[in-house]
Image (tube, grey):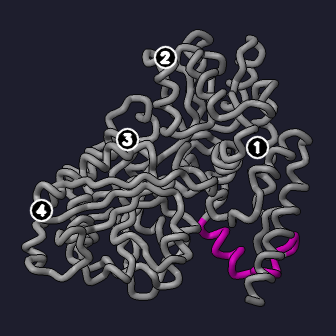
């Protein structure tokens, strides 16, 4: 699955030794004779990263780092869970994880060290650093360095669009017209995979909200209001997201008839076979689609949900962010690994190879033509973090969306979200 995931069962852990070459030599950071955790007399650095699909990629990077720093062992683990590390009091020396509400808990508690002194921190785009601050901050610290930015939109089959002479829509009415024309021609306009609930909130919910509502400002106000959220409050799900959910309701009428029982894997297979014109997915799906038909001519555009083309924005998430827990703040090996991973040739290559965008100032554009339609939005920071990523995992947003799509009662879903928000705010106030 993708980095878009709000929460799902932890992946199986896999540990092994690896090594790599660093941009900053360990000796230059004072590691000679450094007293640190060892493995058979060799200094050992524990590096955990979240994405199972890039295990081998980070293995190769770890080997390079170790080769440039003889005598250092890097233990590379992949795990989807952060909490167990901190509960045991044994977090990794360096973490590379999706920036979300789970990571935010440890940032807010001051369990991540300050990285502002590292040279690489000054090279990160400030408009991307702002995204990390939307979840949580700790006074006086740069707790996370954004490493990889993923952008998502509407993946579309260019051959189908060309066959019917359809333009890439730039307004809401144009989008509805395109869907109506496809439906009239017997083509499924949008393939949806409601059985896999994260695909509903990542696509239908987030895309419908993001270009109409400032998600960061909305949730900041919702957090401040807490138990006072309701139909008459300054903002609320019921009031603020009413128009976006009207859009979502209309979009759902253009889904494949069997959307309720189709999974994410079904969607990748069907879209790869040309069974639908559009797919509300991100770059994480492109590799799976290519396995079905690597010659499929596809592109990506931003879903327009207003009549003003200038209001279009892309959904993004910080796919990976680097951090050093406070327990390892005094380990120069940890800082050296972060500096290596943030080196221009390393970070840019990773993001090119994995269909994402480098967070480094002056980084080259993403070269994959399937993502060309999103590049301008990333360049000018016309993007937003999905509304679904701000909703606590204890709220079953995906299940609520399943019901709303089936019944058409999106208004009821919004009222329920307000009630859940008040309930959680009340619980937090008493703990």
3D distance between C-alphas at marks 3 and 4: 26 Å
Q: Is residue 182 visible?
A: yes
Residue 304 falls in which quadrant of the image?
A: top right
Q: Is residue 319 visible?
A: no
Front residue (pair 44, 275): 44
Q: Mark 4 falls on what kind of element?
A: loop
**Left or right relative to 74: residue 69:** left
Q: Judge whether residue 221 is colored magenta.
A: yes
Q: Residue at x 33, y 43 (%)?
A: 56
Q: Earlier in the sequence, mark 4 or mark 1?
A: 4
Q: Earlier in the sequence, mark 4 or mark 2?
A: 4
3D distance between C-alphas at marks 2 and 1: 31 Å
Q: Is residue 179 above or below residue 329?
A: above
Q: Mark 2 falls on what kind of element?
A: loop
Q: Earlier in the sequence, mark 3 or mark 4?
A: 4
**Which numbered disc covers residue 247?**
1
**Range of magenta residues:** 216-232
Q: Main secondary structure of the magenta part?
A: helix
Q: Nearer the viewer, mark 4 or mark 2?
A: 4
* Residue that mark 3 sits on: 354
Other residues around mark 4 within 10 Å, as few (<14) / some (14–19) / many (≥20): many
* Residue that mark 2 sits on: 293
Q: Mark 3 falls on what kind of element?
A: loop
Please state the horizontal and vertical placement of residue 187, each as a whole percent of the image.
Answer: 71, 15
Q: Are marks 3 and 1 in contact (CB under 8 Å)?
A: no
Other residues around mark 2 within 10 Å, as few (<14) / some (14–19) / many (≥20): some
Q: Nearer the viewer, mark 3 or mark 4?
A: 4
**Left or right relative to 99: residue 229:** right
Q: Is residue 39 above or below residue 293?
A: below
* Residue that mark 4 sits on: 69
Q: Are marks 4 and 1 in contact (CB under 8 Å)?
A: no
Locate the C terminus and report the quarter of the image it occupies: bottom right
């Amino acid at each position: 699955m993708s980095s878009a995931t709000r929460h799902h069962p932890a992946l199986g852990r896999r540990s092994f030794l690896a090594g790599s070459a660093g941009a900053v030599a360990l000796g230059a950071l004072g590691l000679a004779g450094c007293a640190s955790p060892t493995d058979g007399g060799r200094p050992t650095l524990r590096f955990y990263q979240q994405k199972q699909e890039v295990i081998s990629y980070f293995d190769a990077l770890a080997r390079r780092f170790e080769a440039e720093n003889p005598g250092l062992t890097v233990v590379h683990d992949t795990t989807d869970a952060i909490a167990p590390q901190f509960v045991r009091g044994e977090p990794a020396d360096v973490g590379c994880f999706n920036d979300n509400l789970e990571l935010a808990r440890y940032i807010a508690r001051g369990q991540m060290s300050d990285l502002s002194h590292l040279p690489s921190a000054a090279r990160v785009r400030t408009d991307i650093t702002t995204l990390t601050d939307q979840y949580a901050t700790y006074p006086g610290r740069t707790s996370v360095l954004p490493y990889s930015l993923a952008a998502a939109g509407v993946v579309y089959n260019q051959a189908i669009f060309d066959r019917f002479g359809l333009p890439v829509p730039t307004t809401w009415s144009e989008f509805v017209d395109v869907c109506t024309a496809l439906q009239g021609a017997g083509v499924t306009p949008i393939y949806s995979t409601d059985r896999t609930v994260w695909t509903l909130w990542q696509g239908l919910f987030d895309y419908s909200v993001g270009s109409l509502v400032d998600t960061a400002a909305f949730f900041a106000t919702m957090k401040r209001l807490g138990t006072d959220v309701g139909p008459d409050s300054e903002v609320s799900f019921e009031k603020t997201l009413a128009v976006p959910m009207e859009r979502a309701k209309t979009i759902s009428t253009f889904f494949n008839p069997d959307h309720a029982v189709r999974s994410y894997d079904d969607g990748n297979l069907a879209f790869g076979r040309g069974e639908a014109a559009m797919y509300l997915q991100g770059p994480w799906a492109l590799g799976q689609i290519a396995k079905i038909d690597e010659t499929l001519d596809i592109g990506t555009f931003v879903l327009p949900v207003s009549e003003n083309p200038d209001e279009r924005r892309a959904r993004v998430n910080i796919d990976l962010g680097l951090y050093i827990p406070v327990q390892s703040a005094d380990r120069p090996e940890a800082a050296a690994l972060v500096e290596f991973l943030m080196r221009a040739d390393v970070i840019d290559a990773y993001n090119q190879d994995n269909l994402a965008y480098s967070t480094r100032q002056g980084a080259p554009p993403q070269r994959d033509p399937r993502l060309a339609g999103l590049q301008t939005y990333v360049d000018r920071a016309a993007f937003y973090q999905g509304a679904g990523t701000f909703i606590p995992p204890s709220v079953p947003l995906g299940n609520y969306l399943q019901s709303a799509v089936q019944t058409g009662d999106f208004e009821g879903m919004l009222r329920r979200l307000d009630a859940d928000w008040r309930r959680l705010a009340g619980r937090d106030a008493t703990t």
